[in-house]
Amino acid sequence: MIKLGIFLNTNYEADENVVARFREAVEQVRLARDYGFSSVCVGQHFLTEGQKLQPIPLLSRLATESGDMRLLPGILLLPLFNPVYVAEELATLDVLSGGRVLFGIGVGYRDVEFEAFGVRKSDRAGRLEESLEVIKRLWTEDEVAFEGRFFRIPKVEVHTRPLQRPHPPIWVAAQADAGVRRAARVGDVLFLNPQARISTLRDQAELYRRIRRELGRPIPDEMACHKEVFIAPDMDTALREGKPFVEGKLRMYARWGQARELPATSAGFADEGFDDLRRDRVIVGDPEHCIAEFRRYHDEVGITHFSCVLNWPGMQNWQVIRSIQLLGERVLPALR
Amino acid sequence: MIKLGIFLNTNYEADENVVARFREAVEQVRLARDYGFSSVCVGQHFLTEGQKLQPIPLLSRLATESGDMRLLPGILLLPLFNPVYVAEELATLDVLSGGRVLFGIGVGYRDVEFEAFGVRKSDRAGRLEESLEVIKRLWTEDEVAFEGRFFRIPKVEVHTRPLQRPHPPIWVAAQADAGVRRAARVGDVLFLNPQARISTLRDQAELYRRIRRELGRPIPDEMACHKEVFIAPDMDTALREGKPFVEGKLRMYARWGQARELPATSAGFADEGFDDLRRDRVIVGDPEHCIAEFRRYHDEVGITHFSCVLNWPGMQNWQVIRSIQLLGERVLPALR
């Protein structure tokens, strides 16, 4: 069985009506819930060029509309924060959602975020690992004291816990191979990158399984990936409407510096044409094409849970609604 | 007109069912909304002795149940955070609640919080003021660059804004007189302390007005205060049931080190008996007594908005519901 979730675009242009966009997001979540989507995901970035809604308050608000869907802050930029804060915010979100949190974390890559938070980018991996260690201890132990390289917790009695025990599944985002190794070491689920080519994803999934075996850790049943998806009733419409969105979105990621984070085999996406992107990185097509593509990523890579990026900057709500409906009615039933 | 809000207790004992407590909180907010309460407030603390729900996710979740009530994180421990984070989290909460945020901030006082967040307590006032300056600039300017003592923002274009323009009202909590001066200088509304005696509150309100005049800033129409309130249908019940809660709650604050923060005229609350506390610090009584007390604090101090602490650690939900109903049916109409 292949699960689909929806990733909400919460990066808006400077002049958009953000309240209207928020209401549309609520509507999209209700629809996805009714079609049986498995998760709703909101990304985290700071000081973006336009307007942004942050994942913790937005997912908390969406707890009422999302039924049994998992709530996925995807991903939280863990190196930027104090672990006590993250542990208690996420515990609250887990309690108020009845235990539906997936704890999506990553190291981040945008220079402006590290600068504004006073964190050295070269410390990001170390900070993520140390922070995660502290968070797990706060979530599972009755008394904690910690003295690390980046964080220090005086001896405290703690009982603020997520509802899920021992804790929500930890989804670790990976872009570079170093991220894949980290995910194998410290996480529960590998969360692969949407811009990587399928060949890179295949190599990274294999690397992940090899390291898990070396560590004597079980290979998880679940493997996740963000995936940019543009679906339309017929192939011509999908290609014609989808092209400007795909190209615009990938250029934004390139501007943010994300291409540099990927392995060399996948780095050059900003210079590729639409047909190249569509062949190996993004899914654009009619329902039959999308079914075949999800199956290809599942069979060749092992991905079981796609967080589908359906609403891209500049897209109209009716296009997103149409995508959710087509995936819900024509694609999801074929993947069960 | 005197406004009443409700402060939700979100500090639970280690062995309480936090999901049940959360559901009760939702029910309390619905009831308060229907009676015309003006605000719902959730406090922020970390590494408390029991379990805690954090204000940003909880208030985001309560956006759907709270009607026109203002949402008051009260207070946020501003010195512990990076201002970029606070600016964007609060902007999101303001957007998803239709512009209902009151931005309650304070310096904090619990040693364990400063230690765990790696912040020197002696820097707390400087960090609050600098952080607030950055937040206001991020909320109101199209391009921001900042170089301060504690925070540094590289030059960025920013458009992530709260819905309220120029920004949500800034409620600055004050315990010591230094806090009152700070509130006069940098805030929109003075947010007074629940444990201070009425005589201290009177002096602090006068100090606040004097400093506002010296600064040439207008005296706000609104002045706010947390106030511990235990109301019952008759005086005997109020006194009998209320005593253990009042004493327990004040001992908790004393254990957390709050008494040291107050002026000498109000510091010794942990050593006072119930009758002393009730005379000058907490409101415990039947509806007529409560009406008279709210009016006394209004007339003598100038308080116009009480964030009523009705649900204290260990209290049963029916007692809180009864308090909301009595305030809503018997007290609020008399204060309009």
Image (cartoon, coloured by chain):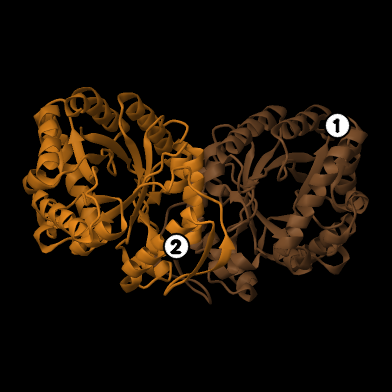
Chain colours: A orange, B brown
Q: Secondary structure at mark 1?
A: helix
Query: Quick one: quadrant of the N terminus of chain B?
Result: top right
Image x and y of residue B207, in percent = 82, 64
Image x and y of residue B195, in percent = 80, 56
Rendered image quadrant of residue B110: bottom right
Image x and y of residue A294, in percent = 15, 37
Task: Pick whichever, A113 or B258, lies toward us.
Answer: B258
Q: Residues within 10 Å of mark 2 (few under 14, many from 20)?
A: many
Q: Is residue B126 above or below residue B54?
A: below
Q: Is residue A10 left or right of residue B88?
A: left
Say how many tags the image has.
Answer: 2
Residue at 15% of width from left, 57% of height from top? A210
Task: Pick whichever, B48 or A106, lies toward us.
Answer: B48
Q: Residues within 10 Å of mark 1 (few under 14, many from 20)?
A: some
Residue at 41% of width from left, 29% of height from top? A67
Q: Mark 1 highlights which residue?
A: B334
Rendered image quadrant of residue B2: top right
Image x and y of residue A191, in percent = 26, 50
Distance in Å between CA atoms under marks 1 and 2: 51 Å
Q: Mark 2 highlights which residue?
A: A134
Q: Secondary structure at mark 2?
A: helix
